[in-house]
Image (cartoon, rainbow, N blue to C red):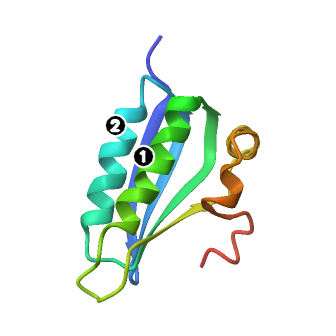
Amino acid sequence: MGRLFNTTVSIDAARLRLVVEGDVDVDTASELLDTIKTAVQCDVLGVDIDLSGVTSVDSTGLDVLVEGERAARNRDSALGHRCHIRLLRPSRAADLALRAAGLDGYLDIVEDAELAV
């Protein structure tokens, strides 16, 4: 069976948006990390990672989100601000994994789509 994973990238104003769908696990983590690190290198104020289509997240997937946040914090944009990552509308599976790992206090999670605009 093929991998269930896809990312879509778009830019709106000064934020870049990644829409992640499928499993975020050991098989897909390196691809997602590469995508996040590339996004962070763009001259944007922040990167929004929409997790509403994520079906499962393992510890490797959680590590990728933490590493992406670290990369953003260490990146000064050409706009004179540090890049900022927000996790948008996590699916139930993603939300449970983030909270079980205690990452809801470390990562910026936006559950309401209206607040993410």
Q: What residue sits 69% from the left and 69% below the top?
A: 113
Which percent across, then down, holds residue 28?
Answer: 42, 30
- Asked if residue 13 is positioned above or below residue 31 in the image, the reply reads below
Q: Position of residue 100 (x, y in %)?
A: 75, 39
How far apart in space, not on screen, are marks 1 and 2 (Cα)?
9 Å
- Circle 1: residue type: Thr
- Looking at the image, tell me whether mark 1 or mark 2 is earlier in sequence order: 1
> Badge 1: how crowded within 10 Å, few (<14), some, or many (20+)?
some
* Res. 31 mark: 2
Horizontal arrangement in the rendering, residue 64 relative to residue 23 (left or right): left
Q: Quadrant of residue 116?
A: bottom right
Q: Residue at x 31, y 54 (%)?
A: 37
User: In the orientation shown, which residue stands out farthest toward the bottom?
Assistant: 80
Disc 1: which residue = 7
Q: Quadrant of the C terminus?
A: bottom right
> Residue lying farthest top?
1
Contact flag, marks 1 and 2 (Cβ < 8 Å)? yes
User: Which residue sits at x=50%, y=48%?
Assistant: 65
> Quadrant location of residue 34?
top left
Q: With respect to residue 27, does 15 lie above or below?
A: below
Q: Residue 52 at what x, y percent from top left?
A: 65, 50
Q: Of the numbered discs in the image, which one, if any, rests on residue 89?
A: none
**Where residue 68 sits in the image (x, y, percent)?**
41, 53
Q: Is residue 77 above or below residue 97?
A: below
Q: Secondary structure at mark 2?
A: helix
Foreground disc of the pair 1, 2: 2
Q: Which residue is painted at 47% across and 33% down in the image?
A: 5
Mark 2 is on which residue type?
Answer: Glu
The secondary structure type at the circle numbered 1 is strand
Q: Please tell me how crowded label 2 is: few (under 14), some (14-19), or many (20+) other residues with Cα within 10 Å.
A: some
In this image, 109 relative to 78: left or right? right
Does residue 42 appear to the left or right of 15 in the view shown? left
